[in-house]
Image: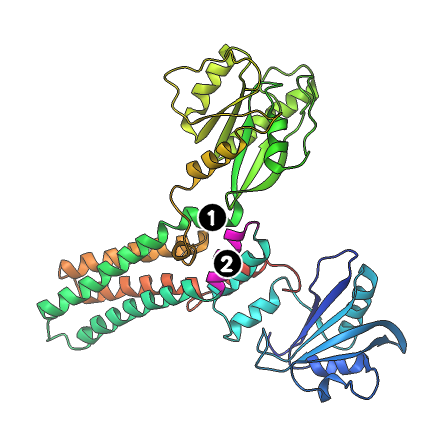
Amino acid sequence: MLDDTIAAIATPPGEGGLAVLRLSGPRALAIADKCFVPAGKRNRLPSAADSHTLQFGKIQRHGEVIDEVLLAVLRAPRTFTREDTVEISCHGGILPAKLILDTLLLHGARLAEPGEFTRRAFLNGRIDLAQAEAVADLIHSRTELALAAANEQLAGKLSARINLLRDDLMLTLAHVEAHIDFPDEDIAPDTRDQLLARLDNGVRFMDELLRSATEGQILRRGIRAAIVGRPNAGKSSLLNQLLGHDRAIVSPVPGTTRDTIEETANIRGLPVVFIDTAGLREGTDDIEREGIRRSHASLAAAELILHVLDAGEPATETDLNYFTEFAGKKRIIIRNKTDLPVRLVLPETLKAPVVDVSCVSGAGLEALKDAIKELVWAGEINTGLLQVMINSRHQGALLRGRTATRAAAEALRAAATLELVALDLREAAAAVGEIVGKTTTEDLLDSIFSTFCLGK
């Protein structure tokens, strides 16, 4: 429904310096007129104000003042949603913003659904679907690299490449359908070669984009790294050092960590979710046993294992068993307490990076960060790569598009019925078009925008 007017609080709940409310739709200015009282002669009612101006005044409800505000008037089409828009900045706090929102709803606005402002920007043609997703990525960015990748996608860098790919598929489809309309004329060999070359180029380009899927997902959601080892090996101390502040309780008493602790840190530009686990041993009571059970669950879900060992003690049979158990995962062996006499000898058959650290002095931590980055992301992170980082939805669409494009090329090479070639090409173009929203469904839009913040 684009003929109604929506409103929502755009800032997070709680107390702060300011709160911002957004109002968008055909009646945005009229609704704001009903509750805004301009201050002095220079400030005007929203409907009488010029576009992209700030008006100072008060919001009233039933004749009583709620708050002094700055009201921004933004007239269509030069707005985020391409609709008439009003943004109200009031004093921060739960009550002023809530009362202003209630007043806007009282005068005819509807409470916006999550992501509905961005959804309207997409439906009104201001941004495509990939750019809309970049808005959410921008909000949830946890590192500067993730922010840069979101900005590249929001600027349309990925969309431009996807649109070129889809245009090539549509052009090939047009050639094929033209020959279907004139069945007496066979496709000339040189024309067939040109069409096949275009399809092969499309497959290569999709392969290039698909190679960025893993990196894109790492930047968006981070990589989960479980810190494991025997009790008192220094797991919690390592977590505190990596985070740069005391998050986990550190004690010389084994078994202090009874539950898993999760915190995110920026490691060489990559968001890494560190999970401090209970020491791996037989639990002495029900609480510790539950903590150890959760540790094993975290290990199963982790993409990286940081196996912490006490360098001052010889390896035990338990340590050797864990070397074998974690062999199938990406892992780094960390010899902690290297500021003390070293008695730990690692097996020569152990195939994993080994880093020596001291959580007391901080020695070796920078080398550990380098090792983490190299293990989860080989090579340099450049601007060109950031421009084409696809997410899991894009990945699924490209996989379907690549399969259909290959099928079309194989059918064309085999001189199959052109109707079959056209069918595969339509499927390929539709799959690629899903990425930018040129082919989409209401269910897909609901799924994407339901993850957005309220008021965005």
- Quadrant location of the C terminus? bottom right
Residue drawn at 57 percent across, 16 percent down = 340
Horizontal side, residue 151 vs residue 435: left or right: right
Q: Which residues are magenta?
A: 142-154
Q: Does any portion of residue 277 appear in the rendered image?
A: no
Amino acid type at circle 2 is: Ala
In the picture, which quadrant includes the N terminus? bottom right
Q: Position of residue 174 (x, y in %)?
A: 25, 73
What colour-coding does the image apply? rainbow
Which mark identifies residue 217? 1
**Magenta residues, dominant SS class:** helix
- Circle 2 is placed at which residue position? 150
Quarter of the view holding residue 236 = top right
The image quadrant that residue 275 belongs to is: top right
Q: CA distance from mark 1 to mark 2?
A: 12 Å
Q: Quadrant of residue 296?
A: top right
In the picture, measured across the screen, residue 363 lies left or right of residue 169, that is: right
Q: Nearer the viewer, residue 294 or 413?
A: 294
Q: Are marks 1 and 2 in contact (CB under 8 Å)?
A: no
User: What is the secondary structure assignment of the residue under circle 1?
Assistant: helix
Residue 390 in sight here: yes
- Residue plotted at (51% across, 74% down): 126
174 is higher (above) or lower (below) than 272: below
Is residue 351 found inside the magenta-colored segment of the image?
A: no
All told, the count of numbered labels is 2
| Marked residue nearer the N-terminal end (1 or 2) | 2
Mark 1: give few (<14), some (14-19) or many (20+) Cα within 10 Å. Answer: some
317 or 367, nearer to the observer: 367
In the rendered image, the vertical position of residue 5 relative to residue 316, given as above or below: below
Identify the amino acid type marked 1.
Gln
State the SS at label 2. Answer: helix
**Residue 252: where, in percent of width, then height?**
68, 18
